[in-house]
Each structure stands twice: as C-alpha cells, then as structure tokens.
Amino acid sequence: MVLGGAGQIPVRRGTGDQAPLDAAARALEAGEVVFVYPEGTSETTDPDLSPARGKTGATRLALATGAPIVPVATWGGQYVWRRSGRQRVEFGRPIWLRAGDPVVLPQGASDASTVRRLTNDVMAELTRLVDELRAEYPRRWAADKVTR
C-alpha cells in the first residue's frame, strides 16, 4: 500500500510482462524519476556483495525514451538489514550512497547484443562505484558484528 502510494510500478518477475516498462516510459514522459534495480532485486546474491549481472530493462527503457541512466550505488545497507533475516537491524551504522555521471545511451541501438553490451557497461560502472564505496567505508563499521 505504501509503495503503491509512492508510485511504485509493480513488476512480476519472470513473466516477460512489458507493462512495467510501458508504465516507466509514461512516468518519464510525465517528468517523473524512475528508479530501477537493474539486477531485478534490491539485494545481490554475490558473496562479495558486488552487483550481479544486470537485466536489460533499464537499458531498454533508456533507449526507448532517451532518458539518461544515473548509476547509483550503495554500501553499508548489508550490515543494517538483509532480507534473508540472517542479520538483525543494526541502528547507527552508516549507509553510503554514490551517484555516478549520467550515462546517455546511443539512440537507435536496439538489437539484443547491443542492449546486452550497454547493460554490461552500466553494470561495470555500478560495480566501480560499489568498489569505491567498499574501499572507503570505515573499517570499524565493516565487521558483521559490532561490539558496543
């Protein structure tokens, strides 16, 4: 209910339904900002917590609308809460966010291999941003458990 009120566009993963991309394109055309988790989830499954292989939806949306992709990475949230419940909520730990430069994709590119390559390029930039945040994150907050 809260997410719907905030304008979340429902996505039924694994169905191939194009309605979410159409709704996102309409939102962009209306001047809205659309936030996409390019991996198809808000939580990575990679053991080192680096971004996994991206799905092509964000790239296809940018190609269809001409909207730039602004890569945004976070670090620290994995120490605060994991959807799996393996860790408890840890208040007071910082969650860092870093936005990269907007990526403007070449218009007219739509074949599957080009879309995959462009998606991989965006994911490489996200990985670079995550790596920067991981390297700069205070070591005292990086342990799985914090002694107080």
Image (cartoon, helix red, strand yellow):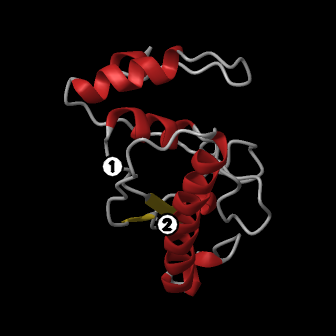
Residue 74 at x, y percent in the picture: 49, 61
**Residue in front for this viewpoint, 29 or 85:** 29
Labelled disc at residue 93? 2
Residue at position x 40%, y 52% from top? 105
Residue 131 in the image: above or below residue 127: below
Quote the CA–CA distance across marks 1 and 2. 32 Å
First in residue order: circle 1 vs circle 2: 1
Where's the C terminus, which quadrant? bottom right
Residue 122 in the image: above or below residue 58: below
Q: Amino acid at mark 1?
A: Pro
Crowd tier of the residue under label 1, counting other residues whose Cα lies within 10 Å: few below 14, some 14–19, many 20 or above: some
Residue 143 at x, y percent in the picture: 67, 76
Residue at position x 34%, y 33% from top? 65
Is 27 on the left or on the right of 86, as rendered? left
Q: Which residue is mark 1?
A: 68
**Residue in front for this viewpoint, 36 or 43:** 36
Number of numbered discs visible in the structure rendering? 2
> Residue lying farthest left?
31
